Image (spheres, rainbow, N blue to C red):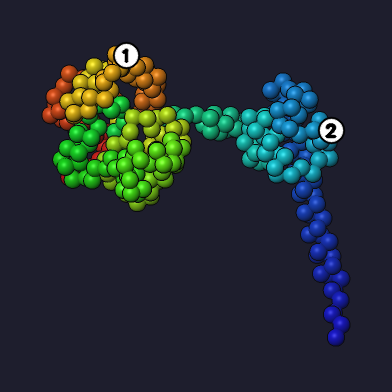
Amino acid sequence: MMEPKPSNTLQQASKASNDDAEESVTALIDHVAMRVYAARKAKRLSRRELSELSGVSPRYLVRLEGGEGNISIGLLQRIAVALDRPIEWLVGADDAMSDELARLVVRYGKADAATRASVLSLLDPEQLRERKAERLCLIGLRGAGKSTLGARLGQQMGLPFIELNQEIEASAGMPVGEIIAMYGEEGYRKLEADTLKEIIATRKRLILAVAGGVVEQANTFEQVLERFHTVWLKAEPTDHMERVRAQGDLRPMAGNPKAMDQLRDILQARESRYGQAEHRLDTSGKSIDDTLNELSALVLSHGIIAAT
């Protein structure tokens, strides 16, 4: 049985639809051509320079800017990155704020987690609160008081207190030292990142203490800053050392006369990263009770954890 031929009306409608689509594609290509040209001129780049930055051939750029390019999404993304513009700006509708918004999007994308959190707190505080919920993370070098203060604050506020390293050990079924010996530093860092993601996904209210070296892992520390309210427990090098020794761990000083100098170097190197925390609390020369009272007041006054 032969298929019926489409009516003239259907043929005409189909042709009109195809014509409209073709006009839309042509308009988009022209629009992209103008945007690429304008952005290139704004950055004072020659086509050859843009070609080197984006990896797209000069010949193709000539066709693109001439409205003759049928550019793929992948190539367009590479050009957008080279021009410091989001790809949406190249294909989006014209509006008075497009250039300003494009610059803001690029700058936001390049900003560190602490800066992005500050921007969100001003522009969309509800979203920031939803992302961080009532999760508090204590950061700082060993001996700052994270474990002691975190446990006591959790007990005081009725919140679970978790040490990330203990969760990693429970997940792996072995101590951190054995994890590193068996899987290396890279394997330990992957477990650290995965364990942190699991905590974020399953808990809305808790106090977390992380190892001092977490700030060296950019992606993991970014997750801490973006998904937790953070407090840097700050102390002088001598306080760090004395507290570690008071815990019965003499390894930092054993057979190492330069241990204190090394500790100072570590603190200095990490200071800018620790400083990305929302809040800081100096624990030097203070009793545990006094520091706990200060930490509790800080948490309640900033609404990090609701009073019970």
**Where 158 falls versus 224 (above or below)?**
below
Residue 279 horizontal side relative to residue 145, left or right = right
Q: Is 81 left, or right, of 48 in this rendering?
A: left
N-terminal of the two: label 2 or label 1?
2
169 or 121, which lies in front? 169
Q: Which mark is residue 258?
A: 1
- Quadrant of the rendered image containing residue 294: top left
What residue appears at the point 78 percent right and 25 percent down from the top-left corner? 48
Q: Where is residue 128 in the image (x, y as percent from the top left)?
A: 39, 40
Horizontal side of 27 relative to 178 (left or right) equals right
Contact (Cβ within 8 Å) of mark 2 with mark 1: no
| Helix, strand or loop at mark 1 | loop
In what element is the residue under mark 2?
helix
Q: Which mark is residue 59?
A: 2
**What is the CA distance from the residue labelled 2 to the residue labelled 1?**
61 Å
Q: What numbered label is drawn on residue 246?
A: none
Image position, residue 19 (x, y; %)? 82, 55
> Given the current orientation, which residue lies at the most extreme front position?
255
- Please give the name of the residue rendered at 38% of the width and 45% of the height, measured from the top-left corner: 195
Place of residue 86 in the rendered image (x, y in percent of width and height, measured from the top left) = 62, 36
- Residue in view at x 70 percent, y 42 percent: 74
Q: In which quarter of the image is the C terminus?
A: top left
> Residue 55, can we see it?
yes
Label 2 neighbour load within 10 Å: few <14, some 14-19, many 20+: few
Quarter of image, res 76: top right
Front-lying residue, 20 or 304: 304
